[in-house]
Image (spheres, helix red, strand yellow):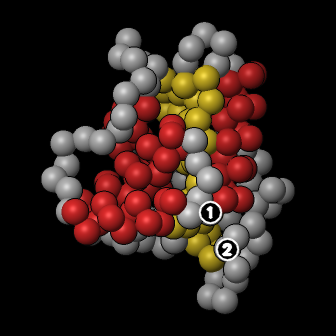
Amino acid sequence: MAAQRRDRGVSAGGDIPVTPLLKKTPLNPWLLFAALVVFLAASCTPEQRAVLEQINIDRAAMGQELLIPDQELIDHAQAWADTMAADGDLRHSPLNGDGLPSGWSVIGENVGTGADLASIQDAFLGSPAHRANMLDARFDTMGSGVAVGSDGQLWVVQLFAQYEPGAAAA
């Protein structure tokens, strides 16, 4: 199956400082424990982890399965967030397989910029295409990247993938 792209970049504004993403969603302690175990396996910055955890919290609230972090997706997302922040240009990465783990059948990407992680996540949730990527039941893995531009704005990449049965996601 060919790669599918369904979204465009989102810009979120505001003067709110960087804050954790955990929102007012009622949390199941077992869900949090399971998410913690999964995320301890990936090497993430606190900001990347906050993005990944919030996506899984949002998915759980909608009855979707948790996504598993993939180190290669995290590395690709972080490299692209760094590129956008350095260039000051919001755009999608070239999802041509370069730097992505092999074996995926569907891939999606959200890119956004804003003052803090919570406002960027809210903008993604408010956009039907971005929300669809985050809640798409076909995806089984994800990665995120967060960079800070010279103006202090955050640049976020959320990368989602589905792997063919038997394909090894790193």
- Is 31 positioned to the left or the right of 168 in the image? left
Label 2 belongs to which residue? 169
Rendering quarter of residue 82? top right
Q: Say which label, 1 or 2, has the lower sequence index.
A: 1
Q: Quadrant of the C terminus?
A: bottom right
Instruction: Say whether residue 62 is visible.
Output: no
- Furthest toward the right, the residue is 98
Mark 1 residue crowding within 10 angstroms, few (<14) / some (14–19) / many (20+): many
Counting from the top left corner in percent of width and height, residue 55 is at 40, 52
At label 1, which amino acid type do we have?
A: Asp
Q: Quadrant of the N terminus?
A: bottom right
Specify the label residue 38 is tagged with.
Answer: none
| Above or below for 164 versus 29 | below
Mark 2 residue crowding within 10 angstroms, few (<14) / some (14–19) / many (20+): many
Counting from the top left corner in percent of width and height, residue 156 is at 56, 36
Measured in 3D between alpha carbons, the distance from the residue under mark 1 to the one under mark 2, in whole angstroms, is: 7 Å
- Furthest toward the left, the residue is 26
- Is 24 positioned to the left or the right of 75 in the image? left
Counting from the top left corner in percent of width and height, residue 97 is at 80, 61
Label 1 belongs to which residue? 70
Report if the CB atoms under discs 1 and 2 are less than 8 Å apart.
yes
